[in-house]
């Protein structure tokens, strides 16, 4: 195991604060921060309309980035991934990365209620220019239906943050 390198990744519902935490962790750890949303917006502008689109394009992105992430880790460079780890299947990708790179990992789980996240979504949307896309409560509910909190039997090194 490479003692200096570490893979840090997130789990938490939409608007729980994952991206904010990812930026803070990257700064603290002097790590490379890779943000899924920025890549998806640049590579597939206007193409992610439905959940199925997100699933398809994010899978392509993970496949393209995986060897590069493993290379960074194997060279002793820590990486923070601002990608959702909100289902067991999503978290399996993170496991593949740190196991392949033979490096340490941390799963940062932000535990926040639906009410807290919906309140944060509303706050986020206040500053958007008119006509900007934003997530509705119905979309939040549809996406959150897939959420699975990390379980002990998954065997991750979990750091839990409770948002009230």
Image (spheres, rainbow, N blue to C red):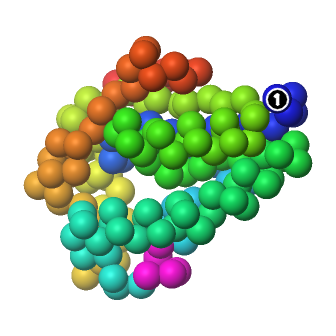
162 vs 80: above or below: above
- Name the residue located 81 percent from the left edge and 37 percent from the top edge: 5
- Name the residue located 47 percent from the left edge and 76 percent from the top edge: 41
Between residues 113 and 33, which one lies in front from this camera angle?
Answer: 33
- Name the residue located 22 percent from the left edge and 50 percent from the top edge: 143
118 vs 102: above or below: below
Percent x, y for residue 33? 68, 54
Percent x, y for residue 116? 28, 35
129 vs 81: above or below: below
**Tag 1 residue:** 1
Observer able to see residue 24: no
Quarter of the figure that contains the N terminus: top right
Binning the other alpha carbons within 10 Å of mark 1 as few (below 14), some (14 to 19) or many (20 upward) gives few
Q: Dot 1 lies on which element?
A: loop
**Residue 104 lies within the magenta run:** no
- Magenta range: 40-44
Q: Quadrant of residue 108?
A: top right
Q: Is residue 84 left or right of residue 63?
A: left
Percent x, y for residue 88? 37, 36
> Which residue reaches farthest left?
138
Between residues 153 and 43, which one lies in front from this camera angle?
Answer: 153
Q: Is residue 37 left or right of residue 126?
A: right
Q: Quadrant of residue 100?
A: top right
Query: Main SS of the magenta segment?
Result: helix
């Amino acid at each position: 195991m490479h003692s200096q390198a570490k893979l840090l990744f997130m789990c938490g519902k939409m608007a729980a604060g994952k991206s904010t935490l990812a930026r803070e962790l990257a700064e603290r750890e002097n790590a490379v921060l890779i943000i899924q949303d920025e890549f998806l917006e640049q590579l597939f502008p206007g193409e992610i309309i439905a959940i199925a689109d997100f699933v398809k394009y994010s899978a392509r992105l993970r496949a393209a980035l995986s060897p590069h992430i493993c290379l960074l880790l194997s060279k002793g460079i820590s990486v923070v991934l601002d990608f959702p780890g909100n289902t067991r299947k999503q978290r399996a990708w993170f496991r593949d990365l740190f196991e392949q790179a033979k490096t340490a990992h941390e799963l940062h789980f932000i535990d926040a209620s639906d009410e807290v996240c919906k309140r944060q979504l509303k706050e986020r949307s206040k500053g958007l220019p008119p006509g900007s896309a934003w997530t509705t409560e119905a979309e939040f509910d549809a996406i959150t239906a897939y959420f699975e909190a990390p379980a002990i039997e998954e065997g991750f090194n979990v750091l839990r943050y409770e948002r009230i």
